[in-house]
Image (cartoon, rainbow, N blue to C red):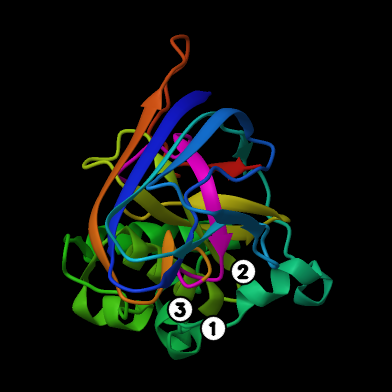
Amino acid sequence: MKFKVKSELKYKIKSESTIILSIQALETEQKIVSEELVISPKTDFKELLSSAEANRLISLALKPTENLSISYQAIVENAFIIKEIKEFKEVDIAKLPSDVLSYLNPSRYCQSDKMYRLANNMFGYKKDDFEKVKALTYWIYLNVEYLSGSTNSETSAYDTVTQQAGVCRDFAHLGIALCRALTIPARYFTGYAYQLKPQDFHACFEAYINGQWLLFDATRLMPLNGMIKIAIGRDAADAAVANIFGDVAFISSKVSCEFLDKDFEPFHQHHENRFAISYL
């Protein structure tokens, strides 16, 4: 399915600074039909790939300016498959691919080592990993209030499970932490999201089940097949939209994701049965 995505970020640069952005569509099986990046005032930049996940990064070396504008737009065909989970095959940890193993470990925002008892008492009895992740995702949806402005850049999964409020970033971190506490690899996923209100970058998570990464979103704010992937990582520290080094003031952001295909429509499918979506 084809989408038109846009983002515009504005900053006030008070001193010589560096901003590293992750706003471009990821080059996986999803097809980038066209894209454009405009920076005003005109600024030299470098395009980089993160060493771990090949996330696309834009590195800007900046001089002081009152109004820096970074605008990105692209037409992208997303790539996913709908998987029917007919039978569960236990994956031996010793046989996991090396690039999956790191997603079993606690990370800065996902302290899975502190959630072992909670996760196993509440979800460990489920018959397989898919049912465990489906149950914990639904539990987050029911028990954590989506509350804009309730958290900050320091809020972790442990904070969210106690405060029971957060935004998409916090819902994703809690889902990841509970998965890892159940010995299920899980990772952070950011993207442009169709039908998200208000429009913004969106975070959810993927769990490694039956040898594949499956998408889960505890917020239920957008169709699971309506995402354009930007980045993945252990948590938001690996997939932040912007990392800022220097004296920089954020002014504003505008994000949009428009559906272009007339013959299809993204659908809200959130694992009420044993079907799941795997992004490629």
Q: State which mark lies toward you, 3 or 2.
A: 3
Instruction: Magenta stretch: give its range.
Output: 220-237
Residue position marked by numbered label 3 in the rendering: 110
Percent position (x, y) of residue 213?
63, 53
Residue at the image position 44 percent from the left and 47 percent from the top: 42
Is 223 or 237 nearer to us in this picture? 237
Q: CA distance from mark 1 to mark 3?
A: 6 Å
In what quadrant of the picture does the C terminus appear? top right
Name which residue type carries label 3.
Cys
Do the residues under discs 3 and 2 have CB atoms within 8 angstroms?
no
Residue position marked by numbered label 1 in the rendering: 106
Tell me: residue 199, above or below residue 133. above
Q: CA distance from mark 2 to mark 1?
A: 10 Å
Residue position marked by numbered label 2 in the rendering: 185
Name which residue type carries label 1.
Pro
Helix or strand or loop: what does disc 2 sit on? loop
Q: Was residue 236 drawn as part of the magenta stretch in this picture?
A: yes
Taking the image as shown, residue 33 lies to the left or right of residue 100, namely left
Q: Which mark is residue 1?
A: none
Helix or strand or loop: what does disc 1 sit on? loop
Do the residues under discs 2 and 1 have CB atoms within 8 angstroms?
no
